[in-house]
Image: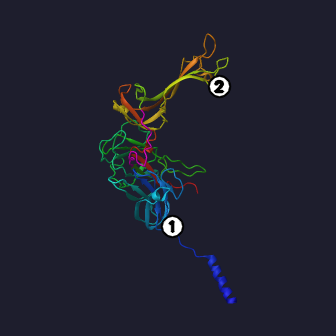
Amino acid sequence: MAIVLGVALVACREDEQGVLQPLAPLAGLRYVNLVPDTGAVDFRIVDIIGDAPSAGAAAFRTGGWPNGVSTNFMPPHFPVEAGTRRIRVFMTGTTPEIASQVVLDTPVTFVENVNYTFYLYGYRRAGRTPSISYLVSEDNVSAPAAGKIGFRVINFAPSLAGAVPPLADTTVRPDLFLRAPQAVPLAAALTGAANATAPAFAVPTSYVLTLDTGNYWAEMTATGSLTPIFIDSLYRGATATATVDVAAGTAQPGTVFTFLIVPRSTGGGPAGVTAKAATAPPLVDAVTRAVDVVTYQTGYRRTWVRRTVDSSGVQVSRPDTVISASAVNVPHGMAAGSFIAVYGANEPEYNGWQRVTATADTTTCIPVDSLVDLRRSCTTLNPATGAPSNVILNLTYRFRYRIVGAPATPATGTIMVMGPNTSLNHSIPAIRTMIDRKPQRVLP
């Protein structure tokens, strides 16, 4: 019995100590959904359990929720066990009928210490070309030269048809330009050669690792042409502080990007169209210019009120009495720096992609208050009785942008504006940015 007990104790001690298992060789993996006629999808590795990153509810142009963790747009690379893994893509759903639908099932081989991106692209609906497919890109890049940044381009837009303003060539492959707005006004025409010329469909270009740091904008045009332009702001990043590490961006040396030229969604499809509705100015003279500054009016609101003032004529904190109101109430929703597409003007200088330089909303009073006093703004006393008069308040919704040239003013035609946030507009092709290499860490 003593011998049996001793053997059992030894076995228990060995069991408690356990056996150290070596870490499996790892690569890096992230997912992107670029299917424009389908709803959100789930990415899964189905041949192993550990070191098998997933992504749920990856909507059109996003990487979903990697391992259940929300991301702003494209996720970072997550560790995946090297070797041949089986990736299966399902429709996102809460019922077995939906969640069991397989969109793609394929083996993919990953090499240790290499980062990869898995792009799902094409069309799921029958009769559309290309059909559902995938691209796995290697994202490992050498560091750019000291003080430099780098980039590459991958074109997933089978055509730029349906763009605003429209492009006639349905088989065009775009050129991509980079420039810093500090040096060149965005309204100025492009000149010179493109930084990346006519990238083939779903074929990554070589990395360019020779750009100076700066606040760049990516601008996409038709092949061999300088117009029209699709503009997308890039991440400037942030320098390190005493408590926050350096953030990747165009102003941070050592950063390397991938620019994705992403397709537009199919109208009315499950991918959705998130464009801000195009707005026509309600007035004939809504688009005017002074030299190169264009003022675009989208609407107004006119309110006839009886103001509430004290005996000295100072506005008091009680509500005004609205007597009547009329409005073409179309707020523009713009801010300085917003990118918009203007089209429909008979004078071509007004059209194209523009950058909002300033909002110009105004509130005026009829009659005009002759006393310059903010406390009694829009308050006029009846000279006969000393009582407050009725006042008409005019709120005008306007914003401004700059153009090159001197077209007739006011602009003519049925003028429309699409924006803001054109990079998030699913009704047109766009440029999306992913970070492939971050700057060297500063903080421990």
Could you tell me which residue is drawn at 44 percent across and 66 percent down?
Answer: 85
The amino acid type, in three-letter code, at marker 1 is Ile
* Residue ID for mark 2: 318
Across and down, in percent, residue 410 comes to: 38, 25
Across and down, in percent, residue 244 comes to: 58, 51
Q: Nearer the viewer, residue 2 or 208?
A: 2
Across and down, in percent, residue 255 comes to: 47, 52
Q: Secondary structure at mark 2?
A: loop
Q: How many residues crowd mark 1 within 10 Å: few (<14), some (14–19), many (20+)?
A: few
* Residue 417 is covered by the magenta coloring: no
Considering only vertical position in the picture, is 81 above or below 66?
Answer: below
Q: Is label 2 in contact with label 1 (beta carbons under 8 Å)?
A: no
* Residue 263 is covered by the magenta coloring: yes
Could you tell me which residue is drawn at 45 percent across and 63 percent down?
Answer: 114
Label placed on residue 348: none
Looking at the rendered image, the quarter that the C terminus falls into is bottom right
The amino acid type, in three-letter code, at marker 2 is Arg
Q: Is residue 303 visible?
A: no
Q: Nearer the viewer, residue 309 or 319?
A: 319
Q: Secondary structure at mark 1?
A: loop
Across and down, in percent, residue 399 comes to: 46, 31
* Residue ID for mark 1: 49
Q: Residue furthest right?
A: 2
Considering only vertical position in the picture, is 111 above or below 56?
Answer: below
Q: Is residue 361 visible?
A: yes
Q: Nearer the viewer, residue 425 or 42?
A: 42
Looking at the rendered image, the quarter that the N terminus falls into is bottom right
Count of labels shown?
Answer: 2
Secondary structure mainly formed by the magenta segment: loop
The residues colored magenta run 262-279
Q: How many residues crowd mark 2 within 10 Å: few (<14), some (14–19), many (20+)?
A: few
**Which circle, 2 or 1, is nearer the viewer?**
2
